[in-house]
Image (spheres, helix red, strand yellow):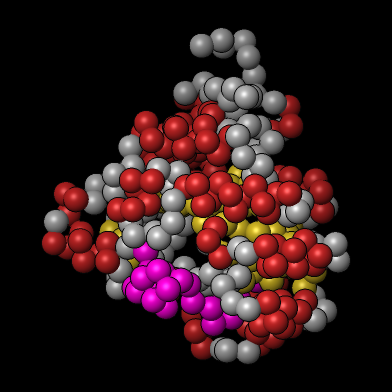
Amino acid sequence: MDTTAIPPSSFHERRYNAYNDWVKREHGGRLQKISIDAGFTCPNRDGTLGVGGCSFCNNDGFTPSYLREQRNILDQIETGLAFMRRRYPETKEFLAYFQSYSNTYGDLDRLRTLYETALAHPDISGLVIGTRPDCLPEVTLDYLAELSQRVPVELEIGIESCNDEVLRECLRGHDFACTRDAIQRAARRRLFITGHLLLGLPRETPASLIEGAKSLASLPIDALKFHQLQIIRGTRLANQYRADPASVPLMSPESYLDAVIDILEHLPPQIKIQRLGSEVPPEQRVSPDWGIRLARFPAMLDARLQERETWQGRLFAPV
């Protein structure tokens, strides 16, 4: 290793390109997302591709409780704003985050009504739309591109894994070619694209994660979110784990951070890292219990990057 090489100066004091640092430079302060549950489902739940969803999926584990209690979008926004203003009083802008399930899975008239309802709130300046790569028809992408001329629009695509064997094992219902195609089509419309990765899925290996990182490095992605696999009650994976724990090997905090770093090393420096992990309410989580709050992850990652004398993009090889 060439120890005289240093991380890009654009990372400032970190060894990776943190999304929050970029937001502060671009927006002059914090940009906060207000979660919305607009009542969507997904093709892997309604019988189009399957029922029951992906093996790991139960959105209740990641959905704020107030979303299950309030159906009106504007009421959800008001509740979310009140909470975020108390927690992050320095926030400059708020985006409506259509989070639960596949938020482009529906006819265009319905999508337009829901998105415009959120944007009608005076304190909402843009949208974040979470979805699957197989729920992005041309007409929907065209509309999102048109909308992005008016307000910021971030499209969050669930990649989860770049390995087709892993995707089949978790009953994802599409392959990585579908993901690649969706990202490329969205990028042609100049949409801001965030990919979502779930590390630790059955049949994933350190080698397949690195190969996946190399595949992602060649795609026009603006940002990535990392999540560690957590087994959530009410999922097929929870049933599998109870029947045979050895069939679902779980990462430790140390192995997870090393997996994140293995991926970061192969990513181009311009990809922004939005999230380093997730927290599931204890009553929803079967395993693992790391006993670590998410707020500690950035410092832990920085320390491990320094220990390994590495940084995001160190092994990135442009094609």
Corner quadrant of residue 312 = top right
Q: Residue at x 56, y 10 (%)?
A: 2
The percent coordinates of residue 280 (x first, y second) are 41, 64
The percent coordinates of residue 9 (x first, y second) are 73, 27
Q: Residue at x 59, y 22 (%)?
A: 317
**Quick check: 260 left or right of 19?**
left
Q: Is residue 34 magenta?
A: yes
Q: Residue at x 29, y 44 (%)?
A: 203
Q: Residue furthest left?
A: 243
Q: Is residue 261 magenta?
A: no
**Quick check: 106 left or right of 117?**
left
Question: In the picture, which quadrant includes the C terminus?
Answer: top right
Range covered by the magenta-colored residues: 32-54
- The residue nearer to you, when weighing 291 against 305, is 305
Examine the rendered structure and indicate whether residue 77 appears above or below residue 33.
below
Q: Residue at x 68, y 54 (%)?
A: 186
The percent coordinates of residue 115 (x first, y second) are 71, 76
Residue 25 showing in the rendered view:
yes
The percent coordinates of residue 129 (x first, y second) are 64, 66
Residue 286 showing in the rendered view:
no
